[in-house]
Amino acid sequence: MSRRPHVLFVDDEPRILGGLRRMLRTHRDRWDMSFAEGGEAALAALRERPCDVIVSDYRMPGMNGAQLLERVRTEYPGTARVILSGQTNEDNLLSIMVLAHEFLTKPSSPEQLVATVERLIDVRTGGPGADRAVLQSLPSPPDTLVRLIEALDGDEASAQAVGSVIEEDPAATAKVLQLVNSSAYTVGRKVSNVGQAVSLLGLPTVRGLICMHDLIRTFDVSGEIPVEWIEALTLHSVETSRLCRLLAEGTEWENNAFTAGLLHEVGQLVLASLQPEAFARALWQWRDPDPEPEPTFLCAVESAVLGSTHVDAGAGLLRFWGLPDAVIEAVAGHATTAQPEAATDACRTVVLAHLVVEADLAPVCGLAGPVALDESRLDPHSREAITRWRRQHSRQG
């Protein structure tokens, strides 16, 4: 029999904890729940029994919520962290967004609290490596931080200008969208437009995040993974997102398709960050299979070498971070061999754009060889969008 998930609730006010006990009584058949009065009591409880999810108030005497979650992040990195608070300002909001995976405002409805805990439990216990993957920063190309700071410090700094820089980096995009999709900003709606996300967060908040070195972590290319890999992966992701925008232009799912196109290979960044040596070995085996001469898909090699795939890691990461379901589904479905005949939704748009970009540039996860693409099967709109993308790409090159 598998163990039940364990959730720890922390508050310095006994009446709040009592209210949570009563509110969540009907869920005792799904989770084991513990309640701790204050940060020190929470750490003592964790030493007795670690938990899958911790939900803590922010303002507490002695050890506040941010200090508690900092300890939890260091000592129990596999625990999902949630702040439940109604009293925050700009400064402590930055700390919360860095330390917590979710920020729920008081009062939070039972449905919202339960849905958040269930989602974090599902990803925390769901797939191979998913619990560790979602708790890591993602690597980014080294020049992104410099360009973001320049955009923020420019005379005409704007959410759209900053968003344009962020959109050129899958890791930065994933982090910004994670932060903005907390309930503190979106109040029940999901955001997939990066410019809108920057506008909602505010330039001061984005600037603070950059200064705190959590939005961007420079990718260490001194190990086993060649610098050419992340450059090629970033180029592929950016070009896929641009083609997605052209394919989906004017549709209600345009932003979801663009964002999914940018993030569809983010799982490779996760695996490279978590297991660089094993992932490098998988890359080499995929590119140059030995002794088998037949080309294969990167996911098949990853599964054999690492026990998980970048598709699972990427979808798990974005689900954990609360991105829109349409974006997650498109990321999860990008590595298919079935060629769509038209871009009729975000999923098909990403699959088609991914295949086109791999065929024109180079494979990043498909068959390590020439990509088979039958453009005669495509509808006129898709063919025209691909032609426009190729024209734009050739001008940029």
Image (tube, rainbow, N blue to C red):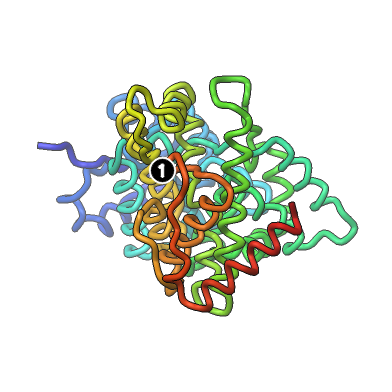
Q: Is residue 226 visible?
A: yes
Between 321 and 371, the residue placed more toward the observer is 371
In the rendered image, residue 18, in percent from the top left (x then y), is placed at 31, 52
Residue 389 in which image quadrant = bottom right
Between 248 and 252, the residue placed more toward the observer is 248
Q: Residue at x 58, y 74 (%)?
A: 384
In the rendered image, residue 134, in percent from the top left (x then y), is placed at 44, 41
Between 83 and 233, the residue placed more toward the observer is 233
Horizontal side, residue 19 vs residue 228: left or right: left
In the rendered image, residue 254, in percent from the top left (x then y), is placed at 54, 71
Q: How busy is the neighbourhood of tag 1: few (under 14 within 10 Å), some, or many (20 plus)?
A: many
Q: Is residue 163 visible?
A: no
Horizontal side, residue 334 vs residue 151: left or right: left
Q: Residue at x 59, y 27 (%)?
A: 226
In the picture of the structure, the residue carrying the numbered disc 1 is 367
Residue 258 in which image quadrant = bottom right
In the rendered image, residue 126, in percent from the top left (x then y), is placed at 28, 43
Q: Secondary structure at mark 1?
A: loop
Between 63 and 56, the residue placed more toward the observer is 56
